[in-house]
Amino acid sequence: MESTGKLLMVLGIILFAVGLLLTFSGRLPFRIGRLPGDIVYERNGLGIYIPITTMILASIILTFIGWLVSRFQR
């Protein structure tokens, strides 16, 4: 039960951080999903969006979260 409690606390902190990010996202100097490095191609009514920078940032954040969860489960 102790490891479950730790896991729930970490998940609660993560959810709180995501909630803060979503609440104050309008005040950030950048828009999530439209970062520099994301590729946007629009021509003749066709739009292609490839969020390379956003995917890299999400990967780094999810790796850190996974590291935190594994750290607390030991």
Image (tube, rainbow, N blue to C red):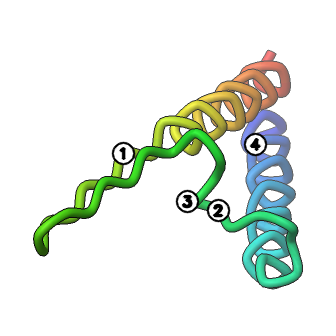
Residues under numbered marks 3 and 2 in contact, where contact means CB atoms less than 8 Å apart: yes
Badge nearest the viewer, 2 or 1: 1
Q: Give amino acid for label 3.
A: Gly
Q: Which residue is mark 1?
A: 50
Residue 33: mark = 3
Q: Which residue is mark 4?
A: 7
| Crowding near the residue tagged with mark 1, few <14, some 14–19, many ≥20 C-alpha atoms within 10 Å | some
Sequence-wise first label, 2 or 1? 2
Judged from this view, the residue extending furthest toward the top is 74
Q: Give amino acid for label 1.
A: Ile
Sequence-wise first label, 1 or 3? 3
Residue 61 in percent (x, y) is at: 71, 36
- Depth check: 5 or 71 in front? 71
Residue found at x 75% / y 42%: 7
Residue 19: mark = none
| Crowding near the residue tagged with mark 2, few <14, some 14–19, many ≥20 C-alpha atoms within 10 Å | some
Residue 9 in percent (x, y) is at: 85, 53
| Crowding near the residue tagged with mark 4, few <14, some 14–19, many ≥20 C-alpha atoms within 10 Å | some
Quadrant (top left/top right/bottom left/bottom right) for the C terminus:
top right
Q: Which residue is mark 2?
A: 32
Residues under numbered marks 2 and 1 in contact, where contact means CB atoms less than 8 Å apart: no
Q: Is residue 68 above or below residue 39?
A: above
- Distance Cα–Cα, label 4 vs label 3: 28 Å
Q: Give amino acid for label 4.
A: Leu
